Image (cartoon, rainbow, N blue to C red):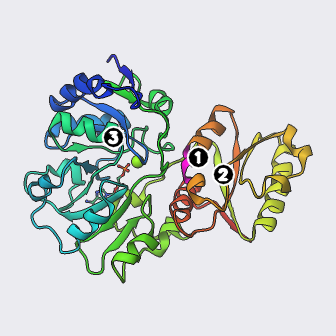
Amino acid sequence: MKTEIIKIDTSVPGWDKQLDDAAQCLKSGGLVAFPTETVYGLGANALDEKAVEKIYLAKGRPADNPLIVHVADTQVIGRLTSNVPEAAPMLMDAFWPGPLTLVMPKSTLVPSIITGGLDTVGIRMPSNPIALTLIKKAGISVAAPSANSSGRPSPTLAKHVIEDLSGKVDFIIDGGSTRVGVESTVLDITVNPPMILRPGGVTIEQLHKLITGIRADKSLSSAHLENSVPRSPGMKYRHYSPNATLLLVQGPPELVASEIGRRAELYNNEGSLVGILSTEETAALYDSSLYAYCKILSLGSRKEPESLAANLFRCLREFDEKGVDIILAEAPDISGIGQAVMNRLVKASGGNIINL
Ligand code: AMP
Ligand code: MG
């Protein structure tokens, strides 16, 4: 299949016309990758089973891992759900358009291929103008998981989508770097109080301001993740993984840096190329003699957890490009969006975690 790549700059008037062909293609059953504010998504017409099947094929995604349905207006929620839970309007008002997916009881219109056989459907309204305009122009609801090969780090640049999906999709819309950098928060509102199934762009602190008692499964950002019973099918898969083995080191930053430095030297001596995922605050703690043998990337500032989220997947892919064998990653603080960053690192590590 030939993949058409369309580069869009939303500061140029008339940019929306560049989406006409892709919108038509989506509507008639094709696959279109597009930027959202979280990560790039791979979209298909949510109510067309054959189209949705192509998403699973292109990504190599397990069939029981449900997809999120993206909408451009709240009117369609009534058609996609069998009833709208009480908490929904308030949450949509506060966080839509934005990185919050609401899990609600599905209507019969929603094919079970979308929901991995569950009787619930995850729905969100993205805020990225390219995503919103594309969905509006297509005039449909759009099922869209992240636009990566299943298991790999999610795409935050069009170049990542091209790496994974070129030749497997009809269009890739290049809208530059995604703003948030980690996926949406998935909130199950079929239960009371609601339960966070995946931490993401909307933080638990933000949700608590609106609804008291919201719970987050502890396993979401802890070392016990691999042994827990998944509450959502997507939770059980190895995810976000670079080709390199990732070892996550958790503890006070100075101790973490010295343990990472010690191991970097050890693995170097064994002949492995080592990547160190550091932060602005800790980068100076690494012995500069290591630099010759290690690739060191800074995720951003610990004082701005948003920067850690924005750079995470790009850095993991950069280590792969550099041919790194082992990534030694500092665990972030889990307040705010740090919890989502920690969750992705825990999953990428496959449980390979050191607690100091
Ligand atoms: P992705 O599209 O790759 O960002 O992954 C979507 C994730 O959202 C899945 O892996 C699930 O964890 C979650 N999800 C989507 N729909 C549902 C649902 N109906 N029930 C529970 N979790 C869901
Ligand atoms: Mg994904």
Residue shown at 46% from the left, 73% from the top: 205
Dividing the image into four quarters, tell me where ligand 1 lies.
bottom left
What range of the chain is rendered magenta? 309-313
User: Mark 2 highlights which residue?
Assistant: 300
Looking at this view, name the residue that lies furthest to the bottom: 213
Q: Nearer the viewer, residue 20 or 51?
A: 20
Which element is circle 1 on?
helix
Q: Is mark 2 within 8 Å of ligand 2?
A: no
Residue 236 position, x and y percent, is 42, 59
**Badge 3: residue crowd in 10 Å (few <14, some 14–19, many ≥20):** some
Q: Is residue 169 visible?
A: no
Up the image or down, 210 lies above or below 51; here it is below
CA separation, marks 3 and 1?
Answer: 21 Å
CA separation, marks 2 and 3?
Answer: 26 Å
Residue shown at 76% from the left, 66% from the top: 253
Is-magenta flag for residue 198?
no
User: Mark 1 highlights which residue?
Assistant: 311
**Drawn side of residue 293 relative to residue 185, left or right:** right
Q: Nearer the viewer, residue 217 or 175?
A: 175
Whether tag 2 and tag 1 are in contact, CB under 8 A, the answer is yes
Q: Quadrant of residue 25?
A: top left
Residue 164 position, x and y percent, is 45, 31
Task: Give the position of the C terminus as an image quadrant.
Answer: bottom right
CA separation, marks 2 and 1?
Answer: 7 Å
Sequence-first disc among 3 and 1: 3
Query: The residue under label 3 is which amino acid type?
Result: Pro
Q: Is residue 152 visible?
A: yes
Q: Quadrant of residue 247?
A: bottom right
Residue 7 position, x and y percent, is 41, 24
SS majority, magenta: helix
